């Protein structure tokens, strides 16, 4: 049995230590906002925060999470920066198909949490691990800059 702190709540799950956090979130706890896509840490659709740092949940074994706080897309809008990012996303009409958006929002929120006024290079570096099949990168950059100004 493993106890995790997810979105401010304690969850105890029966999972092997080497099970990806992604499967624990989706299959054992029912938080399906964190998406599965590549499964090899390349696309970023499964991005969550571990103690505020953006991590690909498909690459994190649940046994390694320990006491770190896990935040998923379901709760990011409850944080001040997450709420700004979500509002900016809507305003800039970033989403098209929407599949990558949870990961994009999580990565962008982590960026602004650590770098409140990012440069284009900061944005590029922070968002490099989250791919958008629809290519909305121009609107994504605009949304991040607008959220930083808010």
Image (spheres, rainbow, N blue to C red):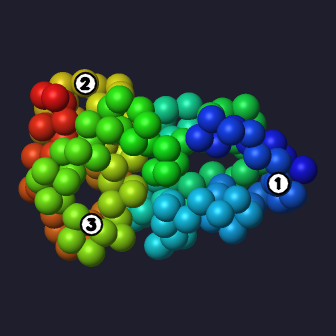
Which residue has dot 1 on it? Answer: 13
Which residue has dot 3 on it? Answer: 132
Q: Is residue 41 visible?
A: no
Left or right of 139: which side holds 6? right
Above or below, 114 against 39 in this view is: above
State the CA–CA distance, disc 1 to disc 2.
35 Å
- Residue placed most toward the observer, 101 or 86: 86
Q: Which of marks 1 and 2 is in front?
A: 1
**Residue lying at 64% horizontally and 58% vertically, measured from the top left:** 25
Above or below, 108 against 43 in this view is: above
Q: Name which of mark 1 and mark 2 comes first in the sequence.
A: 1
Disc 1 crowd, CA 10 A, few/some/many (<14, 14-19, 20+): some
Disc 2 crowd, CA 10 A, few/some/many (<14, 14-19, 20+): some
Q: Nearer the viewer, mark 3 or mark 1?
A: 1
Disc 3 crowd, CA 10 A, few/some/many (<14, 14-19, 20+): many
Percent from the top left, x then y, of residue 148? 18, 30
In the rendered image, which quarter contains the C terminus? Answer: top left
Residue 6 sits in which quadrant?
A: top right
Residue 20 sits in which quadrant?
A: bottom right
Q: Name which of mark 3 and mark 1 comes first in the sequence.
A: 1
Which residue has dot 2 on it? Answer: 116
Q: Name which of mark 3 and mark 2 comes first in the sequence.
A: 2
């Amino acid at each position: 049995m493993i106890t995790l702190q997810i979105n401010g709540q304690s969850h105890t799950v029966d999972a092997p230590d080497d099970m990806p956090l992604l499967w624990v979130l989706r299959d054992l706890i029912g938080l399906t906002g964190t998406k599965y896509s590549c499964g090899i840490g390349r696309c970023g659709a499964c991005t969550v925060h571990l103690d505020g740092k953006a991590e690909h949940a498909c690459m994190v074994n649940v046994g390694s999470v320990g006491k770190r706080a896990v935040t998923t897309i379901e709760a990011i809008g409850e944080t001040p920066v997450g709420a700004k990012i979500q509002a900016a996303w809507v305003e800039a009409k970033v989403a098209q198909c929407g599949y990558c958006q949870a990961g994009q929002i999580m990565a962008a929120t982590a960026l602004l949490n650590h770098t409140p006024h990012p440069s284009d290079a900061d944005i590029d570096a922070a968002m490099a691990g989250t791919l958008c099949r629809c290519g909305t990168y121009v609107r994504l950059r605009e949304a991040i800059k607008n959220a930083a100004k808010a």
